[in-house]
Image (cartoon, rainbow, N blue to C red):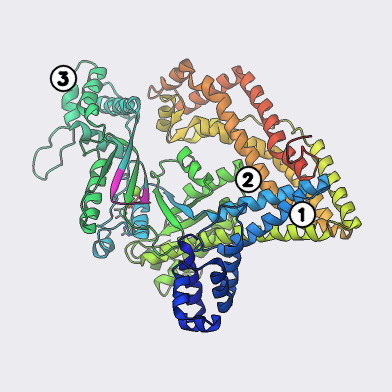
């Protein structure tokens, strides 16, 4: 027996309110026997007798868990917080498997049973897993890092935390966090840094130097183009190169910028860039990890704070410019929760949240994304645009369970909100309620009702408020998964109970043949209404010109504007317009069958098909996204001529720069229409494999379970 048995048995007894002696009496034995059972040394029969003596529903569930074979799901810990759901799922999987293995089960029934089995297995795996990520997303300077440090206890101590000074990660007046930071619980305080690539560092230095030279030289216009890298990157690079701008001192003459002084010594910008790069001493900055080797937890926190800040600012001589930092801390990030949490601090949104890193978090089924908003503008347009974008290009039915809004309040803001009447709220709580009602109304207006939101002031509110909110979202998410699992189990039971009746068989046959006919009629999609690249061209037209330029310099791969992501999402958006029509048509047929009294026996199954359709559609759209990227990435990223032609006119005052880029890209896509055709072929193929084939299988018309026709 495994070591968690005893602990689980003891827990059940404690929850029942019985003492060891009382249980011993009920069992007709002595207390020593009970205490042996609770230390996990009891034989299976002892454990069963112990649980029977206790007799609560928890005891019954644990008895079932101990009895189960766990043939379908890996055996969970007997301390698992969702043990009873998992026991029920394992039982449901057992039933559906035996049905499938029965002699002479009809192909139609087998198809249905397989769909139910897949759904239930997935639910079991989702619920078994207790690992979650909490991801903070929002504009630069809204207070993401501060809020997450409060939530996860990443502070020096409570006192300094209340002054917002003692955060273990770097916080500041915006433009502070250099890169994505992932915080994980582990053995000890440590840091792992994944650096920015050398070619990218070189490009950044080039941009930094060009910005300075153009500002200095008389030939630049009064309004030189913006070519500087972001402030936080410039700060880190200057620190790394020992070329820090001097602090202005009152009453003293201004000291010149050392990069300007350096520039004057060279004839060409290239020489300046080379000098800057050589001063970075990248060859010395090869370290990837660093750990605190002391034992004192307070010293460990201080070490983390100062080491993190120095790496984040380029002041640690062994580390290069970070592209991603992983922080490990020797404590749980949400203490007392049954789940285990990793926290992710994303880089502040600069222009648009439509970024590959943020998209990856949103698509992660284990991640809860918190869209952080300023008080005054909540829900920030950043979050609204992001949600609209992903909803247009995807169909993940669980996405909105995994996103929530956090309104970050600052001193006095709660009381500044006004009732419709124009009156001020009486206290902070009322101010919060008013604001959240406004947020909800706005979300309703853009078609996102039901999204959860919370208001939090890192300086004044107890962190428990934010912790409870996060845990509440995870509880909701898991509850929705458990409810779905029970609905699937219900459908399995209904199918098994009715499988023999002649009427039922006829009803299933009829429903199946309709589904199959529908699948055959829709195995080819309608023609695409738009081109996949339209979304990209639209974005080029509205993103900041510097951002567009930066991506042309990186052949489309800029972290803040990734051309291939837009192509993928663009293709998915076009595909979604086509698949939605089919999904709607199928839903209508299923709903009408569900209203037919002669088909009642199939209702459980049909509602499972309805619930599963968004998953098939989401898989289709993911596949399309992937195919679009793979079709375009090679030819487009390697079109050096195109990218040069796009990069070159920047800052030369030749009309609207972005319009020019848009035009050149459009021409390229039109010249390469064969890529569009290739993508279309692949879209047809993935539609067939991700939507039509599983529908036919569920209708009992596909290849059967062992793969033979
Ligand atoms: N007064 C006040 N300042 C805050 C609060 N939260 C964050 N700040 C300050 O706002 C600045 C930006 O915060 P930071 O967490 O670095 O923002 P980020 O860029 O979103 O990570 C810092 O100077 C914080 O101290 C708050 O609740 N109240
Ligand atoms: Mg930050």
Q: What element carries label 3?
A: loop
Locate residue 1 relative to residue 342 in the image: left or right: right
Disc count in the image? Answer: 3
- In front: mark 2 or mark 3? 2
Magenta span of residues: 183-191
Q: Which of marks 1 and 3 is nearer the N terminus?
A: 3
Disc 2 to disc 3, C-alpha distance: 58 Å
How crowded pointer 3 is (Cα within 10 Å; few <14, some 14-19, many 20+) is rated as: few
> Relative to the observer, which residue lies in front, 299 or 129?
129
Point 40% across, 41% down: residue: 350
Find residue 681 and report its horizontal and vertical position in percent.
Answer: 68, 25
Mark 3 highlights which residue? 265
Quadrant position of ligand 1: bottom left
Q: Is mark 3 within 8 Å of ligand 2?
A: no
Find residue 203 and report its horizontal and vertical position in percent.
Answer: 33, 25
How crowded pointer 2 is (Cα within 10 Å; few <14, some 14-19, many 20+) is rated as: many
Say above or below: 353 vs 629.
below
Point 70% across, 30% down: residue: 684
């Amino acid at each position: 027996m495994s070591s968690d048995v005893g602990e689980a048995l003891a827990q059940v007894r404690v929850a029942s309110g019985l003492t060891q002696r009382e249980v011993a009496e009920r069992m007709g034995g002595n207390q020593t026997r009970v205490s042996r059972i609770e230390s996990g040394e009891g034989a299976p029969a002892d454990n069963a007798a112990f649980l029977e003596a206790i007799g609560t529903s928890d005891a019954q569930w644990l008895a079932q868990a101990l009895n189960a074979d766990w043939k379908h799901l890996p055996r969970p810990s007997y301390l698992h917080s969702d043990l009873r759901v998992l026991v029920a799922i394992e039982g449901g999987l057992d039933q559906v498997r035996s049905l499938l293995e029965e002699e002479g089960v009809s192909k139609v029934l087998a198809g249905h049973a397989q769909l139910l089995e897949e759904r239930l297995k997935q639910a079991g795996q989702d619920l078994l897993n207790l690992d979650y990520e909490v991801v903070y997303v929002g504009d630069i300077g809204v207070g993401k890092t501060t809020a997450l440090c409060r939530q996860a206890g990443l502070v020096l101590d409570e006192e300094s935390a209340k002054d917002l000074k003692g955060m273990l990660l770097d916080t500041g007046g915006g433009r502070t966090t250099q890169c994505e930071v992932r915080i994980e619980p582990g053995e000890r305080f440590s840091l792992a840094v994944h650096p920015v690539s050398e070619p990218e560092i070189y490009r950044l230095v080039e941009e930094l130097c060009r910005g300075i030279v153009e500002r200095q030289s008389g030939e630049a216009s009064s309004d030189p183009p913006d070519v500087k890298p972001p402030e936080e990157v410039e700060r880190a690079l200057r620190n790394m190169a020992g070329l820090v701008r001097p602090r202005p001192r009152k009453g003293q003459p201004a000291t010149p910028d050392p990069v300007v002084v350096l520039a004057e010594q060279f004839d060409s910008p290239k020489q300046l860039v080379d000098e800057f790069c050589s001063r970075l001493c990248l060859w010395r900055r090869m370290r990837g990890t660093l750990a605190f080797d002391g034992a004192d937890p307070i010293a460990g926190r201080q070490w983390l704070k100062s080491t993190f800040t120095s790496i984040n600012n380029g002041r640690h001589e062994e580390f290069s410019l970070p592209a991603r930092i992983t922080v490990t801390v020797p404590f749980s990030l949400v203490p007392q929760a049954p789940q285990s949490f990793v926290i992710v601090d994303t880089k502040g949104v600069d222009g648009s949240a439509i970024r590959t890193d943020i998209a990856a978090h949103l698509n992660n089924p284990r991640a809860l994304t918190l869209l952080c908003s300023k008080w005054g503008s909540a829900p920030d347009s950043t979050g609204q645009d992001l949600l609209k974008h992903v909803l247009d290009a995807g169909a993940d039915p669980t996405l909105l369970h995994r996103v929530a809004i956090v309104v970050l309040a600052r001193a006095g803001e709660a009381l500044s909100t006004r009732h419709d009447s124009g009156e001020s709220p009486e206290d902070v709580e009322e101010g919060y309620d008013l604001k959240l009602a406004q947020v909800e109304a706005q979300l309703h207006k853009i078609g996102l009702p039901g999204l959860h939101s919370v208001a939090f002031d890192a300086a004044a509110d107890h962190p428990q408020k934010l912790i409870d909110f996060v845990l509440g979202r995870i509880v909701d998410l898991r509850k929705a998964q458990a409810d779905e699992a029970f609905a699937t189990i219900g459908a399995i039971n209904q199918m098994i109970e009715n499988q023999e009746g002649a009427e039922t068989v006829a009803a299933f046959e009829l429903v199946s043949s309709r589904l199959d006919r529908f699948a055959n009629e829709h195995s080819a999609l309608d023609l695409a209404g738009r081109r996949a690249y339209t979304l990209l061209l639209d974005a080029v037209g509205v993103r900041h010109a510097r951002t567009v330029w930066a991506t042309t310099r990186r052949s489309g791969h800029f972290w803040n504007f990734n051309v291939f992501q837009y192509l993928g999402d663009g293709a998915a958006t076009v595909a979604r317009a086509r698949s939605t029509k089919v999904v709607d048509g199928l839903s209508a047929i299923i709903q009408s069958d569900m209203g037919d009294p002669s088909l009642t026996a199939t209702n459980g199954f049909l509602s499972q098909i309805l619930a599963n359709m968004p998953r098939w559609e989401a898989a289709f759209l993911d596949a399309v996204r992937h195919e679009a990227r793979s079709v375009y990435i090679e030819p487009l990223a390697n079109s050096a001529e195109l990218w040069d032609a796009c990069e070159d006119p920047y800052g030369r005052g030749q009309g609207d720069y972005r319009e020019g880029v848009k035009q050149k890209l459009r021409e390229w896509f039109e010249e390469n229409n064969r890529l569009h055709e290739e993508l279309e072929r692949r879209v047809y193929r993935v539609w067939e494999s991700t939507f039509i084939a599983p529908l036919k299988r569920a209708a009992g018309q596909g290849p059967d379970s062992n793969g033979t026709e």
